Amino acid sequence: MADARFRDVITTESELRKHVGPANRWLTSKILHRLDRRCQTFIAASPFVVIGSTNPLGMVDLSPKGDRAGFVRSLDDTTLAIPDRPGNRRVDTFQNVLQKPGVGLVFFVPGHRETLRVTGRALVVRDHNIRSTMMDKGRMPELAMIVAVERAFFHCGKCITRSNLWDYEAHPEQAWSEDAGEANSRGRGWSDDLCLMIIGSPFAGRNVTCKVGHTACPGLS
């Protein structure tokens, strides 16, 4: 994709490596093809995951999913199950997976520097045995996404450190200042997932106010 507005565009991997150097061999050697105990423990502690998928035209979609820690289940060391909670019913990820099953996941655990990256192939199921293990407030999800894991590795925590992502005192306004009216007009959105993400985080129990109109956000006081 050419764009005449920019100069010195990198177009080959050799050019790219000339400027950034070779990949760190120690890190690349840590890529797993199965979820070890550390990966499964991290997933069980994660209340938030971002799912990447691609449509047939190559357009990439990123979808955030948030719930109580452990909502993504490790069925075994190569299989994950993700419940579909009620939301905006766009189902972009599901529509993409029906045609191109490749997905990428990034798991976050509040307070932790590292993230866990997982790639694999997904399918959408209504398997009652799977869905019945994912009840939330007595309600079973209508659908679940199964991911057959192909690769997994922990990503360096420098981006979390640089952003002060878990340091509420470093950027309290940015964390909570989205216009409440705009957010409410959209209904459930990122703010709901963010509130769920806070459960169990260093912010839980702090005297902070959700500015999206929630009256009893879990984890907030």
Image (cartoon, grey):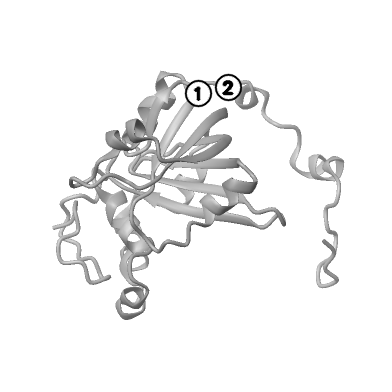
Query: What is the distance, in whole Å, between disc 1 and disc 2 at their CAs?
Result: 8 Å
**Number of residues whose C-alpha sits closer than 10 Å to that of mark 2, classed few (under 14), some (14–19) or many (20 or more):** some
| Picture quadrant of residue 102 | top right
Foreground residue, 196 or 88?
88
Query: SS class of the residue under badge 2?
Result: loop
Tell me which amino acid carries mark 1. Answer: Thr
Q: Are marks 1 and 2 in contact (CB under 8 Å)?
A: yes
For residue 20, the mark is none
Residue that appears at 67% across and 57% down:
59
User: Which residue is labeled 1 in the image?
Assistant: 78
In the rendered view, does 162 fall on the left or right side of 88? right
Seen at 31% across and 36% down, the residue is: 70
Q: In the image, 58: left or right of 134? A: right
Asked if 106 appears above or below 78 in the picture, the reply is below
Task: Identify the residue position indicated by label 2 in the image.
Answer: 33
**Numbered label tally:** 2
Query: The N terminus lies in which quarter of the figure?
Result: bottom right
